């Protein structure tokens, strides 16, 4: 008797319906700071029931615009600034030390510190795109990350680790939120800090983070699934860059 894949027989739970737009206007409350997002005058709350608010006026206006752009239903995936601010309020603020510890834990695996030995054109491309970010990190923050070629590990010194921790410690909650989100998508704390501080934008971060993958696709082609995944990551990094810019503003 042939084996049966029971997973194919399972009843698929329908995806929950998106909530319908229930408000007429989305705006920023006139009093403040902090600048609170309101729907028909009633405050928006985060998943943990805290007020969705910020002391950055431009960010608050942009988030209110995200809510106002919803038409018949509320598509939360189309509101990245809202999600990032809610993350800052609910998670990054209360768990700041834990988040910094987690970021530092992965410093030895920073993408920019692992270079190809060959082919020559890939090696040159990595140096041209990645090294300026490390040079900027050194000039701005005094952090000189070690770089290795091939499969050799690029273990960072205690001084580099302490320096990177100091950079993260100096960030406010919003900047740290942007850095944490960018690090998860790019595989590089160096890139994440550069994006959070405005040294590079979302498109540059994506290009640097996916340099090796893009190089391979130039040679062998790109399938539809990979293209969709890359497009989604690029869009997320652009949103994080916008969030960081509004927070700096």
Image (spheres, rainbow, N blue to C red):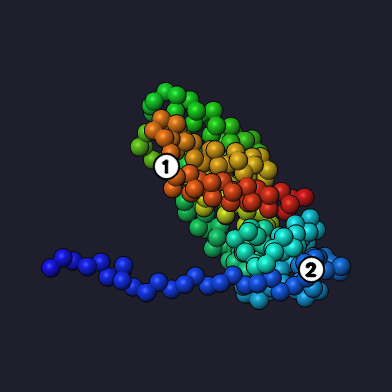
Q: Is residue 63 above or below residue 188?
A: below
Q: Which residue is mark 1?
A: 223
Q: Which mark is residue 246?
A: none
Q: Residue at coordinates 69% horizontally, 70% vertically from top-left?
A: 21
The count of marks equals: 2
Q: CA–CA distance between discs 2 and 1?
A: 42 Å
Left or right: 39, with 231 as reference point:
right
State the image quarter where residue 116 is shown: top left
Callouts 2 and 1 close, C-beta under 8 Å: no
**Rendering coords of residue 149 (x, y %):** 40, 32
| Most distant residue in the top direction | 120
Left or right: 113, with 165 as reference point:
left
The answer to whether any part of residue 157 appears in the image is no
**Rendering coords of residue 183 (x, y %):** 54, 50
| Most distant residue in the right direction | 30
Q: Which residue is mark 2?
A: 25
Q: Residue at coordinates 67% horizontally, 67% vertically from top-left?
A: 72
Name the element at disc 2.
loop
Which is more N-terminal, label 1 or label 2? Answer: 2
Q: Nearer the viewer, residue 237 or 192?
A: 237
Q: Residue at coordinates 86% horizontally, 69% vertically from top-left?
A: 31
The answer to whether any part of residue 79 appears in the image is yes
Name the element at disc 1.
loop
Q: Is residue 87 above or below residue 120?
A: below
**Rendering coords of residue 135 (x, y %):** 59, 33
**Rendering coords of residue 79 (x, y %):** 65, 60
Q: Nearer the viewer, residue 188 or 105?
A: 188
Query: How many other residues sit within 10 Å of disc 1, few (<14), some (14-19) or many (≥20)?
Result: few
Q: Nearer the viewer, residue 40 or 198?
A: 40
Query: How many other residues sit within 10 Å of disc 2, few (<14), some (14-19) or many (≥20)?
Result: some
State the image quarter where residue 22 is shown: bottom right
């Amino acid at each position: 008797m042939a084996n049966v894949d029971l997973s194919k027989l399972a009843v698929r739970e329908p995806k929950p319906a998106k909530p319908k737009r229930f408000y007429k206007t989305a705006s920023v409350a006139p009093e403040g700071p902090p600048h609170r997002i309101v729907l028909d005058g009633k405050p928006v709350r985060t998943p943990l029931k805290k007020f969705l608010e910020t002391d950055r006026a431009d960010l608050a206006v942009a988030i209110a615009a995200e809510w106002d752009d919803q038409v018949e239903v509320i598509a939360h995936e189309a509101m990245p600034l809202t999600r990032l601010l809610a993350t800052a309020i609910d998670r990054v603020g209360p768990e700041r030390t834990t988040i910094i510890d987690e970021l530092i834990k992965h410093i030895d695996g920073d993408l920019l510190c692992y270079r190809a030995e060959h082919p020559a054109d890939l090696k040159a491309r990595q140096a041209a795109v990645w090294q300026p970010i490390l040079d900027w990190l050194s000039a701005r923050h005094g952090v000189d990350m070690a770089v290795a070629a091939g499969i050799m590990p690029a273990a960072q010194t205690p001084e580099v680790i302490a320096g990177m921790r100091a950079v993260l410690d100096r960030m406010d909650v919003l900047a740290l939120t942007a850095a944490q989100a960018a690090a998860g998508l790019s595989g590089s704390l160096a890139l994440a800090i550069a994006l959070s501080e405005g040294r590079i934008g979302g498109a540059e971060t994506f290009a640097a983070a996916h340099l090796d993958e893009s190089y391979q696709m130039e040679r062998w082609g790109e399938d539809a699934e990979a293209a969709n995944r890359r497009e989604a990551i690029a869009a997320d990094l652009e949103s994080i860059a916008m969030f960081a810019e509004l927070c700096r503003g």
